[in-house]
């Protein structure tokens, strides 16, 4: 579609994955190469004593870091597994 009028006048060519990617196997290889995750699992910053595996204390201070606090849905000490868990935004405060 981009190579036909009128769009062909402004189309400068494919950027990614590129014209060399022709098969589903090529596309899969390209996707694996360029894909990454930047998501946190809910509760990944557990609020509990450090010796029990906690990451933050009850004042949201990160163990082992100076003047860093965490605010958001990543700090529950316990949560129920209802199947409705949703990712929450998280804010790191550097004081």
Image (tube, rainbow, N blue to C red):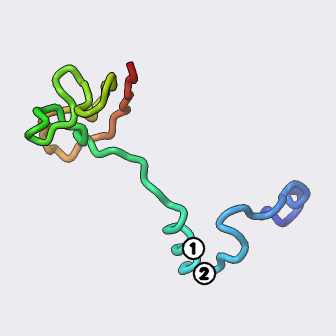
Residue 23 numbered mark, or none: 2
Name which residue lies at 58% across and 78% down.
Answer: 26
Q: Residue at x 83, y 58 (%)?
A: 11
Quadrant the N terminus occupies: bottom right
**Spatial CA span between label 2 and label 1:** 6 Å
Q: Quadrant of the C terminus?
A: top left
Left or right for 32, reference 39: right
Residue 20, image x and y in percent?
70, 77
Q: Is residue 14 above or below residue 58?
A: below
Nearest the eye: 33 or 6: 33
Residue 82 image-quadrant placement: top left
Can you identify the residue that label 1 sits on?
27
Out of 16 and 51, give the one closest to the viewer: 51
**86 above or below 56?**
below
Q: Regarding mark 1 in the picture, which secondary structure is present there?
A: helix
| Vertical order, 89 against 53 (above or below) | above
Asked whether the beta carbons under mark 2 and mark 1 sit within 8 Å of each other, the answer is yes
Q: Residues within 10 Å of mark 1 (few under 14, many from 20)?
A: some
Badge 2 marks a residue whose secondary structure is loop
Quadrant of the rendered structure where residue 74 is? top left
Name above or below for residue 93 compared with residue 86: above
- Indicate the position of residue 72 as horizontal and vertical percent values: 31, 28
> In the image, 17: left or right of 72?
right
Q: Quadrant of residue 90?
A: top left
Res 11 label: none
């Amino acid at each position: 579609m981009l190579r036909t009028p009128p769009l062909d006048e402004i189309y400068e060519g494919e950027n990614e994955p590129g014209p060399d990617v022709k098969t589903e196997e090529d596309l899969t290889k390209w996707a694996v190469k360029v894909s990454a995750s930047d998501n946190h699992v809910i509760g990944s910053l557990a609020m509990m004593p450090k010796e029990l595996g906690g990451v933050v204390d009850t004042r949201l201070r990160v163990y082992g870091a100076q003047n860093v606090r965490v605010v958001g849905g990543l700090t529950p000490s316990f949560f129920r597994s209802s199947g409705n868990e949703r990712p929450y935004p998280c804010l790191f405060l550097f004081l």
